[in-house]
Image: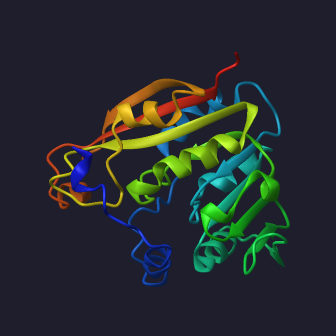
Amino acid sequence: MLSSQANRVMAVGEWEERWQEDRIGFHQPNVHKMLEAHVDKVVAGRTGVRFFFPLCGKAVDMKWLADMGHSVVGVEISEKAIKQFFEENNMTYSEEAVPGIPGAKVYKGSERNISLYQCDLFNFSSAIGGQFGAIWDRGSLVAISPKDREKYAALIISLMAKDCRYLLDTLLYNPELYSGPPFFVPDEQVHSLYGSSCDIELLQSVDALTDRTRNWGLDFLTENVHLITLKTS
């Protein structure tokens, strides 16, 4: 079933263009319901957890977590998205170069512990940002080019601290009807990407078909949320 999307390539510039033109239907003005429902499972009683947001956009989820006392590191290619995040949340920020990634910048919130790196996700590493106690992947795995998924999973696993709790949101639909993004990621692929080094638990599966996604030509859309943790043995 994947075959119809296997060769679809999302160039980094394509995402920058979407932000520039405000074609950001994927941006949600409220905290994501799946994060809200499962945040206790992700935090697991810890305080001051370091959260990683791959392809973070201007997700309001970041401020929500920072307001709870957690710290947030995001990676986003669009400078516009990062600046809008701080401006729309009335936060001041500083801007500095990132040693180790030519041309990259990091924007640091002054009032909250939020650092957003403007760079290609695949140029980011634990050498740059350390490891994380939690990851919220709402629109990242489903947004990257399907052919990059192995490389993506390897990067994410390298960013996971031993106690990391990784919340992954995926979408199931008929890829013959819609070319993406967001792309179709079957559960068996989640297991093939992460299963050798991680335990995977399906936390919730909901019908996510809306008028907007029906307009893509879809006849069903299921949103799955998985909790992924490193195997201890």
Residue 28 position (above or below residue 131): below
Specify the quadrant that holds the C terminus: top right
Q: State which quarter of the image contains the N terminus.
A: top left
In this orientation, does residue 113 appear?
Answer: no
Residue at horizontal 43 percent and vertical 76 percent from the top: 14
**Image point (72%, 71%), residue name:** 90
Structure colour scheme: rainbow
> Residue lying furthest top in this view?
233
The one of 154 and 163 positioned closer to us in this rendering:
154
Q: Nearer the viewer, residue 211 or 221?
A: 221
Residue 52 at what x, y percent from top left? 68, 49
Percent x, y for residue 34? Answer: 48, 39
Quadrant of residue 18 within the rendered picture: bottom left
Q: Taking the image as drawn, is residue 203 in sight?
A: yes
How many numbered markers are drawn?
A: 0
Viewer-closest of 115 and 102: 102
Q: Is residue 23 above or below residue 2?
A: below
Q: What residue lies at 63% left-to-right and 78% top-to-bottom?
A: 79
Viewed as shown, does residue 77 lie left or right of 118?
left
- Residue found 58% across the figure and 65% down from its top: 58
Q: Is residue 25 left or right of residue 179?
A: right
- Residue 120 lies, in percent from the top left, at 61, 69
Q: Residue 137: x percent and y percent?
A: 54, 47
Splitting the image into 4 quarters, where does residue 198 fall?
Answer: top right
